[in-house]
Every structure is written in C-alpha cells, then in structure tokens.
Image (cartoon, rainbow, N blue to C red):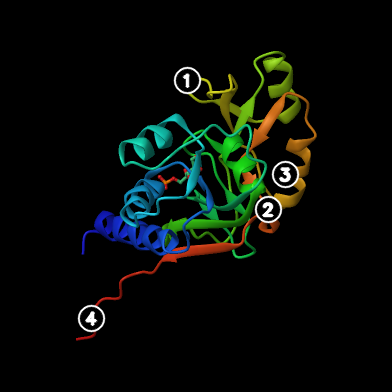
Amino acid sequence: VDATLQVEDQKRAAAEAAARLVDDGMRVGLGTGSTVGFLLPALAARGLGRIRCVATSQRTEAKARELGLPVEPFEALDRLDIAIDGADQIDPNGWLVKGGGAAHTREKIVAKAAERFVVIASSDKEVERIGAPIPLELLRFGLAATRSAIGEVELRDVPTSPDGGVIADYTGTVGDPAELSARLSTTPGVVEHGLFPPELVTDVLVGSRKRSPLS
Ligand code: 5RP
C-alpha cells in the first residue's frame, strides 16, 4: 500500500472521529494543518446549526467559511468547549510539538481556553523522544539578542505570523521537554514556542496503522 495514502487515511480517520465529538451549541476551536483539512468538511457535514467556531489561522478561517462553518473573532469568547488540532510530534508522555504550520501561538491560546483539547494525527507523528526542530514565534524587536539568548535558532523563510511575530525554529538539543519549555517561556522576546505540555491535552486520536493481511 502506498505509504502517503496510508498517512492520509489515518489523518482522515482521526479527523472524522474528532468531528463526532462536537455537539450542537458548542464553542469550537479549529486548529491548522492538513489533518484539520479533513476535520473541517467532516464537521460541516454534521450540519450543526448552532456551533460557534474560532480559527487558529487565516487558512483555516477561509476554508471553514467556504464550507459554511460560522467563524468569529477570538476576542470576546473567554472559554471554548472543545478545540481540535493536529501535531508534529507526540511523545509517550503526551508532550506535543506543534507549529509546523507556524500557527502555534494562536493554537496554544485556543488549546488553553478549551475544556477539551483533542489532538488528531497519523501514526507517523508518534515519537519515542521529542526532538528539534521546536517552532518559535519571536518578537522582531531585539531579534539578534533573543536568538543569542536561546542558542541554536534558525529563522524560517516564511511570512511573519498574523500577529507580526518572526517564525523560527530551535534546532539545539531538546533533552527534557519540561526544562526546555520553561527555558523558552522565560526568555524575553519569545512570544511562544511549540512545546505543548501533557496537561493541556485531553485526548489524542491517532489513525491506526493498516495491517497487511496475513497470508
Ligand atoms: C500548525 C500545526 C499543525 O497542527 C501541525 O503542523 C500538524 O500539521 P499536519 O496536520 O499538516 O500534519 O501545529 O502550526
């Protein structure tokens, strides 16, 4: 079986399972990425007329609106019932790396505001140990000083975030994700980083590997 097809099937399966967790009337946080790309039509197909959505990126917002999902700015809502998003890495303790799509700052705010944060992914996202790159959003002011305080940082060749931040990656040793997370969070100039702690995560839905038929 084509490996890419398998990965796509797994993403779709996880996304469709997550769409079934949404009830009418819920306030829903929509993540960013190709797995969320399967979530949006699955959610729209449920025809829930009273859900209220917030989006973690302009890409998601545009696609959601196209499908008829109601998206509102995330300024007045203080709580969400559920947020559903993808991940780049998932370790056995539930630590995540997010931000492959440069949306991790908004994604973390949305995840934190949600009663239930559901991660959807294909099985290739499961790792034994979290490793670099760890996505960063940095303030442009003091950029060289912030880079030098962090150590190994590569700037990404992408536009700034919708909030004006410079997108980069920490490329050094990760070691204990809790220690690195604390270090990055306390470095002035770091708007946000892509390490998400297990306490933030309620459910992880991973599309299972297709087993080859026994012969
Ligand atoms: C975007 C993210 C995505 O959720 C993450 O990169 C996974 O993407 P995909 O579903 O395309 O594998 O964190 O900032």
Front position in the image: 60 or 189? 60
* Beta carbon of the mark 3 residue lies under 8 A of ligand 1: no
Q: Residues within 10 Å of mark 1 (few under 14, many from 20)?
A: few
Residue type (three-letter) at the residue carrying disc 1: Pro
Please state if 181 lies on the left or on the right of 58 as rendered. Answer: right
Front position in the image: 181 or 9? 9
Mark 4 and mark 3: span between their CA atoms? 42 Å
Residue type (three-letter) at the residue carrying disc 2: Pro
Secondary structure found at label 3: helix
Residue 170 shows in this picture: no
Residue type (three-letter) at the residue carrying disc 3: Ser
Q: Which mark is residue 102?
A: none
Q: Residues within 10 Å of mark 2 (few under 14, many from 20)?
A: some
Mark 2 and mark 1: span between their CA atoms? 27 Å
What residue do we see at 31% from left, 71% from top? Answer: 210
Residue type (three-letter) at the residue carrying disc 4: Pro
The correct choice, above or below, for 146 with respect to 78 in the image is: above
Q: Are marks 4 and 3 in contact (CB under 8 Å)?
A: no
Assign the C terminus to one quadrant of the image. Answer: bottom left
The residue singled out by tag 4 in the image is 213
Q: Which mark is residue 181?
A: 3
N-terminal-most mark, 2 or 3: 3
The picture quadrant where one finds residue 121 is bottom left
Mark 1 and mark 3: span between their CA atoms? 24 Å
For marks 2 and 3, give the one nearer the viewer: 2
Please state if 26 lies on the left or on the right of 109 as rendered. Answer: left
Mark 2 and mark 3: span between their CA atoms? 8 Å
N-terminal-most mark, 2 or 1: 1
Q: Are marks 1 and 3 in contact (CB under 8 Å)?
A: no
Q: Position of residue 114 (x, y in %)?
A: 62, 51
Secondary structure found at label 1: loop
Please state if 152 lies on the left or on the right of 68 as rendered. Answer: right
